[in-house]
């Protein structure tokens, strides 16, 4: 069980849609579509991926981080550090 | 013919790899993998998409924008504005 | 007392440096410096600001969010939601 | 003369406002303000900086890049590559 387990079906649906978006972008490249139109689709897929990441992160903080804090001990610090590093990777990608 | 035509096969290969990455992320969600590990893969896929976008943009500027500038007339301004809007969407995604 | 209080002097030093960077960028515009060199400095200042934000966020999660979790009750959920919204603003800026 | 010269006063005004925003963020840290409120201001300053960068970039493409293209010769390629690198730094910051 993870923070995202309750929303698993929703994430799977969104990820399948993003997979389709990326396949659609490849099709646009194959069909010689106009570069700017391709870029618009790449931005949309990127935004959708970031949005999945933000959801997973919120679920993670609301469960793993909160649970570690409640359990007490040094584990909470490690979880916060780990989440902060994941956020940094996200902000810089 | 577009700016990216000469690199089409390379873009297609990269987009297929990203499609596989997104499918792999869905598999991780299905298999109840640890949230932070999923987030790491989402960041990697996002970065790969941004990198495709930056390549397409450079190809576009080096062909469509440069060609419009050489042709003279007001078309160059329109192309620059269009590229700037695509860059803004990219920076904000 | 906040999560960042223990690191206040460090944040103040970094923010003063960023203030100086922004002043330096204005000076470059006044002195008619080359656009790409100005953009390089804007990217550096942006990165420095994002890095301050990531630090503040980690301090915040390690104190306010963890404290609310330990206190129990519905406050922890509200803190997680608030932090997630701050992260979303950061990722999209 | 650069692409941004015609808009210099506007850029200077915006950069001075951003400098003030950063000074205001330092003041919030000094005054022990709530972390999330500080983060909101950091996101706003970051967005304002990115917006200046996008403006400078559009001005640059509409002048330096277009001029190099019109002049012909290999200079246009170098200008496009340089602009693409500046865009990549921006997207990744």
Image (tube, coloured by chain):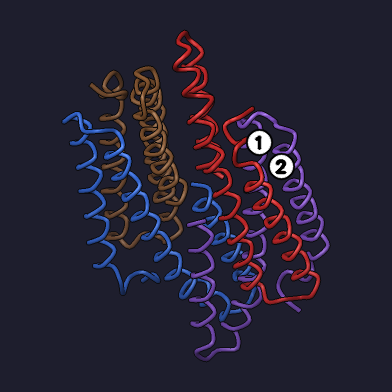
Chain colours: A blue, B brown, C purple, D red
Name the subunit of mark 1. C
Name the subunit of mark 2. C
Q: Quadrant of the N terminus of chain D?
A: top right
The residue sitting at 65% across, 41% down in the picture is D8
Q: Which mark is residue C29?
A: none
Q: From the viewer's side, name the closer residue of D70 and A84.
A: D70
Whole-percent x and y of residue A39? 32, 40
Q: From the viewer's side, name the closer residue of C83 and D26.
A: D26
**Local secondary structure at mark 2:** helix
Left-right relation of A56 to C93? left
In the displayed structure, would residue B29 be above or below residue D89?
Answer: below
Q: Which mark is residue C25?
A: 2
Q: Quadrant of residue C35?
A: top right
Whole-percent x and y of residue B25? 32, 52
Q: Which mark is residue C38?
A: 1
The residue sitting at 52% across, 43% down in the picture is D54
Are the residues at dot 2 and dot 1 in contact (C-beta closer than 8 Å)? yes
């Amino acid at each position: 069980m993870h923070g995202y387990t309750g929303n698993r079906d929703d994430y799977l649906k969104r990820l399948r849609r993003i997979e389709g978006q990326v396949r659609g972008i490849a099709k646009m490249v194959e069909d010689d579509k106009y570069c700017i139109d391709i870029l618009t689709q790449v931005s949309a897929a990127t935004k959708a991926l970031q949005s999945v990441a933000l959801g997973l992160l919120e679920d993670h903080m609301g469960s793993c981080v909160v649970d570690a804090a409640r359990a007490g001990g040094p584990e909470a610090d490690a979880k916060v550090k780990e989440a902060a590093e994941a956020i940094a990777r996200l902000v810089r990608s």
